[in-house]
Image (cartoon, rainbow, N blue to C red):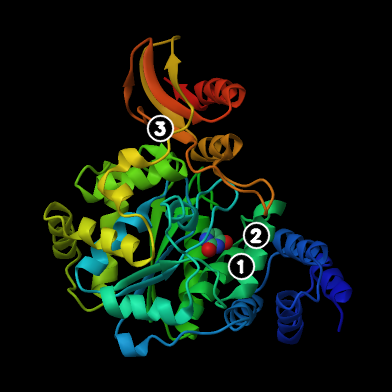
């Protein structure tokens, strides 16, 4: 068996055997297949797709490319994962709420992918926060304080870590078999027995229509079933960015505000929808509306924010940044975006375009080795449905390069469609 033959087979739209998929994953994880060969195969999968059986085999091979954690001693552990979005700071808000309600959360998150942001990049913008702790420490943290959020730096689904970075740099993200195997391999390896998936659709999501999102959700639910992990999917819109900010520091600050009760309506809806299902899966109540009230209670009584601080401190982060979010580094240039032309209502604010703008400012990666700039991003004052009067400031661009900042202002003016 060799990689050229496997690439040619997928290029020619043939189905790969379990042995061929295992060969690719094992050899690529062990650095015996070059990035350019893996990229060619990933592109062939992106273009020609995979059967259900191939996707299940790919997921299993990726999940077993490293260790599989056994969290059974902790009890019912619920995990959550999103298929990606722009301005999606949901995990930072949801995970501490759920942990504050006594349900252990052990979650392995990802980095930014394409024009979408990643929870790990956001957490790393908190000075000192360690996302690459050992497996033992991960389990100990969940036992000790009921929550740990980590990156893919341990030996958990290492194949996904490599393929994820390649996909980001080769525009091969929007593929059902690649997304399903990426997410489910991580979830299986990280050991949670129950999984809630946020499957997004719309401009800022990898699935552009609700139908495609349902297809992806069904594929992941089936993989979860075969792996013995009860999986529930919630389908959520991602036409415009979620919440008010896009960019790493800005989103952490928005998440802290949300945990204090100042939560944007769209963010609140997603957090409550996912969280009420997580509580149900954990056996904490079958009534989703009741579960939502319990979640709101723990925002309003401060317990969720306390849990977030505990999480940050426990993973080496400087908790004074959470106590006083003014400490987060600000971009050098904060430029208002003003629409002079017309009065009206915001009709469109394409999340994908806003996400690309954030990457352009340095908030995401173009090449997989790129360092991201945590302080840049976009604050959206006006969103779809909001009324605009001539001369209103609709947004702010946060930039560290003045020229890029000015260009971003112009680009954002065009992204706003006013009716
Ligand atoms: N999140 C992941 O972990 N993988 C994907 O492919 C997309 C979103």
As drawn, 226 above or below 404: below
Helix, strand, or loop for circle 1? helix
In the picture, the quarter occupied by the C terminus is: top left
**Residue 379 tag number:** 3
As drawn, 202 above or below 36: above
Query: Could you say where residue 38 lies in the image, as x and y percent from the top left?
Result: 77, 67
**Residue 403 tag number:** none
Q: Which one is nearer the viewer's eye here, 261 or 292? A: 261
Dots 2 and 1: beta carbons under 8 Å? yes
Helix, strand, or loop for circle 2? helix
Residue at 62% x, 65% y is: 178
Residue at 76% x, 74% y is: 31
Q: Residue furthest bottom?
A: 73
Query: Quadrant location of ligand 1?
Result: bottom right
Helix, strand, or loop for circle 3? strand
In the picture, the quarter occupied by the N terminus is: bottom right
Query: Could you say where residue 339 lies in the image, as x and y percent from the top left?
Result: 44, 15
- Using a 10 Å C-alpha cutoff, classify the residue at mark 3 as few (fewer than 14 neighbours), some (14 to 19) or many (20 or more): many
The answer to whether 216 appears left or right of 396 in the picture is right
- Regarding residue 227, the answer to whether it shows in the image is yes
Dots 3 and 2: beta carbons under 8 Å? no
Query: Could you say where residue 389 lies in the image, as x and y percent from the top left?
Result: 33, 13
For ligand 1, tell me if the residue under mark 3 lies within 8 Å.
no
Which residue lies under the disc numbered 1?
Answer: 161
C-alpha distance separating marks 2 and 1: 6 Å
**Residue 165 tag number:** 2
Badge 3 or badge 1: first in the primary sequence: 1
Asked which quadrant contains residue 24, the reply is bottom right
For ligand 1, tell me if the residue under mark 2 lies within 8 Å.
no
């Amino acid at each position: 068996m060799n990689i050229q033959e496997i690439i040619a087979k997928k290029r020619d739209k043939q189905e790969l055997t379990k042995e061929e998929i295992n060969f690719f994953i094992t050899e690529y994880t062990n650095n015996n297949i070059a990035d350019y060969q893996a990229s060619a195969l990933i592109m062939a999968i992106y273009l020609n797709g995979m059967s259900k059986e191939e996707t299940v085999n790919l997921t299993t091979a990726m999940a077993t490319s490293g260790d599989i954690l056994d969290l059974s001693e902790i009890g019912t552990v619920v995990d959550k994962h999103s298929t990606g979005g722009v301005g999606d700071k949901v995990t930072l808000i949801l995970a501490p709420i759920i942990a504050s309600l006594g349900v252990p959360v052990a979650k392995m998150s990802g980095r930014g992918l394409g024009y979408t942001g990643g929870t790990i990049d956001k957490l790393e913008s908190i000075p000192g926060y360690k996302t690459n702790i050992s497996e033992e420490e991960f389990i100990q943290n969940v036992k000790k304080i009921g929550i740990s959020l980590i990156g893919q730096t341990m030996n958990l689904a290492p194949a996904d870590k490599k393929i994820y970075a390649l996909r980001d740099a080769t525009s091969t993200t929007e593929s059902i078999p690649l997304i399903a195997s990426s997410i489910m391999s991580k979830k299986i390896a990280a050991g949670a027995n129950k999984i809630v998936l946020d499957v997004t659709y719309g401009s800022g999501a990898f699935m552009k229509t609700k139908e495609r999102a349902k297809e992806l959700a069904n594929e992941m639910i089936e993989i979860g079933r075969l792996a013995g992990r009860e999986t529930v999917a919630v389908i959520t819109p991602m036409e415009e960015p979620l919440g008010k900010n896009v960019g790493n520091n800005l989103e952490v600050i928005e998440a802290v505000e949300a945990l204090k009760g100042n939560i944007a309506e769209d963010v609140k809806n997603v957090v409550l929808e996912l969280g009420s299902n997580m509580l149900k899966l954990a056996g904490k109540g079958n009534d989703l509306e009741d579960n939502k009230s319990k979640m709101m209670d723990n925002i309003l009584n401060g317990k969720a924010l306390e849990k977030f601080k505990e999480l940050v401190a426990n993973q080496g982060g400087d908790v004074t940044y959470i106590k006083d979010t003014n400490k987060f580094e600000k971009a050098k240039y904060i430029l208002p975006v003003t629409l002079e032309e017309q009065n009206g209502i915001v009709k469109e604010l394409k999340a994908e375009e806003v996400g690309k703008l954030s990457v352009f400012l340095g908030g995401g990666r173009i090449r997989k080795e790129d360092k991201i700039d945590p302080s840049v991003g976009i604050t959206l004052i006006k969103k779809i449905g909001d009324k605009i009067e001539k001369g209103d400031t609709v947004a702010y661009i946060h930039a560290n390069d003045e020229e890029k900042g000015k260009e971003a202002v112009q680009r954002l003016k065009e992204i706003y469609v006013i009716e």
